[in-house]
Structure formats: C-alpha cells, structure tokens
Amino acid sequence: MYPNQRPKKKSNELVNEFIPYRFKNIRVVFPDGRSQVLSRDEGLRQAEALGLDLYCISPNGNPPVCKILNYSKYLFEKKKKEKEMKKNQKEIEVKEVRFTPLTDLHDLETKANQAIKFLEKGNRVKVSLFVKGRMISKMDAADNKINTFLDLVKEYGTCENKPTLEGKYYFCYVNPISKK
C-alpha cells in the first residue's frame, strides 16, 4: 500500500480512518462516559492512545457523535443481540379450515375443534367456505354456515373482519384471544 492511499473499505460503518474528513469537529464519547468536542484527527489520536477504535454513532448529529470503543467486541455484541432477538421472535402461522355449505353440524363441530387446537397454539385461522356451482346464488346458507362456525370458536378467537367472497371461497380470519 502506498503512503497516501487509504485502506480499502470493508463495510459501510464509519470507523477510524473511514470517518470522513468533512467531519472537522466531532463529539467524542470516552469509555468512562465523559464527552468532549475534538477535531477528527485528535479523536483518532485519543482512540489510538487508548488502544481502541473510534466509531461514528450518529453521523447526522451536529457535531457528529463518535464513541471510543473496541469495535470487534461491539460487532460481536451487536450480532449476539440480533441473534437473540431473532430467536425470541415468534412467527405466527396461518392455518386453514375448509368446508362447504352442505357440511353437517357434527362435521362442522369437528372442524371447529381443529380450529380451536390451532387457536390454542397461538396460530391464526383462515376459515374458508367453498361455494360450488349454483350455491353462489344462495349466499344466505353460506353466511349462516360460517356464522355457526364462528359461534363455535368465539370463546377461543375473534373474527378479524366480516366474511368476504373472493372467487369461489367465502372466507374470514380468526385471531386467537391472547392469554393474560
């Protein structure tokens, strides 16, 4: 590497030499918590004297805020925190229960029991009523059937929106009731 050449940038982070020269003055936060407004070069010298890195936390501030810290340790902690957040994040799954307007009450109760199991696990349930052929003209029967189903599961979940017709499916979503 030539003497006047800057090292190649590996990421978008503003660390040490990658802090732009346009930042004439920066607010430097020291490891002990005190802060001071210094020139960019003086901030780099202070960080080097402590054997640590100068990391720009807030480049949009006036003056930009930089912190003296161990950058590799900071990255490790940041990745560890992101991994922990991802692990604790629960993914809500949408389960589907299908039936037709001709489904008998006992079969509808069986479907409702399956939906209740899904709701108890914390999953969202899509209730789909498949309307065949000429049944589309008798939507009151379909509406009664889906309302009967919703009455069976009302203790475990609430209907998100009123049932809508899309293509040959009359459907709505049921969200689980949160346990307190």
Image (spheres, rainbow, N blue to C red):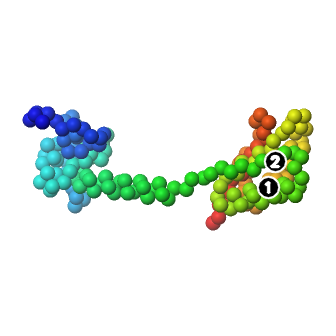
Q: Examine the rendering and report whether any part of residue 91 can be seen.
A: yes
Image height check: is 33 above or below 64?
Answer: below
Q: For this view, does 156 lie left or right of residue 61?
A: right
Label at residue 28: none
Separation of marks 2 and 1 at Cα, in angstroms: 8 Å
Identify the residue at image location x=31%, y=52%.
75
- The amino acid beneath tag 2 is Phe
Picture coordinates of residue 49, whole percent (x, y): 12, 54
Q: For this view, does 170 lie left or right of residue 123?
A: right
Q: Secondary structure at mark 1?
A: helix
Q: Secondary structure at mark 2?
A: strand
Which of the 4 quarters of the picture holds residue 35? bottom left
Q: Examine the rendering and report whether any part of residue 23 can be seen.
A: no
Residue at mark 1 = 111
Residue at the far bottom: name it: 180
* Labels 2 and 1: the sequence-earlier one: 2
Q: Nearer the viewer, residue 22 or 6?
A: 6
Picture coordinates of residue 77, whole percent (x, y): 33, 57
Residue at mark 2 = 99
Residue at the far left: name it: 3
Q: Nearer the viewer, residue 93 or 52?
A: 93
Crowdedness near tag 1: few (<14), some (14–19) or many (≥20) residues, C-alpha within 10 Å: many
Q: Quadrant of the C terminus?
A: bottom right
Label 2 with label 1: CB-CB less than 8 Å: yes
Q: For this view, does 96 lie left or right of residue 139?
A: left
Picture coordinates of residue 83, whole percent (x, y): 42, 55
Identify the residue at image location x=65%, y=61%.
121
Q: Quadrant of the N terminus?
A: top left
Picture coordinates of residue 108, whole percent (x, y): 84, 54
